[in-house]
Image (cartoon, rainbow, N blue to C red):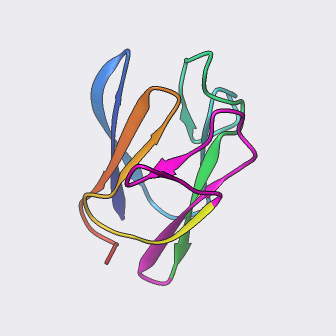
Amino acid sequence: MLNLVVVDASGRRSVSVPSGPFTIGRSSDTQLQLNDAHVSRRHAELIQDGSNWRVRDLGSRGGTFVHGGRSRMFDGVSKDSAITGSGVKRKLAGRGHR
């Protein structure tokens, strides 16, 4: 299990990620729906690889950033990894990561 801490216009909240792929975006068919015009309908996803996690940008216009660098695919996401995109900050916490 992975916990994702989301900080956006709605405030700060924790979201459980039971397994991947876990999609993030504006669309109602994503596991984490973000109501922000700067977030793409299908913005990014978390992918579980054994006990490790990856972040993959799904072709979003604004991009996905891990530790401040823009990335299409980032391997080795670990606890306290800062993932940002279009004014929304997400931080991994909890169990199930490196």
Q: Residue furthest front?
A: 69
The one of 34 and 72 positioned closer to us in this rendering: 72
Residue 70, magenta (yes or no)? yes
Which residue shows up at 34% across the image and 72% down it? 96
Image position, residue 20 (x, y; %): 56, 63
The image shows residue 82, relative to residue 61, as above or below, that is below
The quadrant where residue 63 appears? top right
Which residue shows up at 43% across the image and 30% down it? 88
How many marks on residues? 0
Image position, residue 13 (x, y; %): 29, 32
Q: Residue furthest right?
A: 59
Image position, residue 95 (x, y; %): 27, 68
Left or right relative to 80: residue 30: right
The one of 65 and 89 positioned closer to us in this rendering: 65
Question: Which quadrant is the N terminus positioned in?
Answer: bottom left
Residue 53, magenta (yes or no)? yes
Which residue shows up at 51% across the image and 64% down it? 19
The quadrant where residue 46 appears? bottom right
Q: Residue furthest bottom?
A: 50
Image position, residue 47 (x, y; %): 57, 66
The one of 49 and 60 positioned closer to us in this rendering: 60
Question: Which quadrant is the C terminus positioned in?
Answer: bottom left
Which residue shows up at 38% across the image and 36% down it? 89
The image shows residue 36, relative to residue 14, as above or below, that is above
The image shows residue 82, relative to residue 42, as above or below, that is below
- Which span is picked out in magenta? 50-72
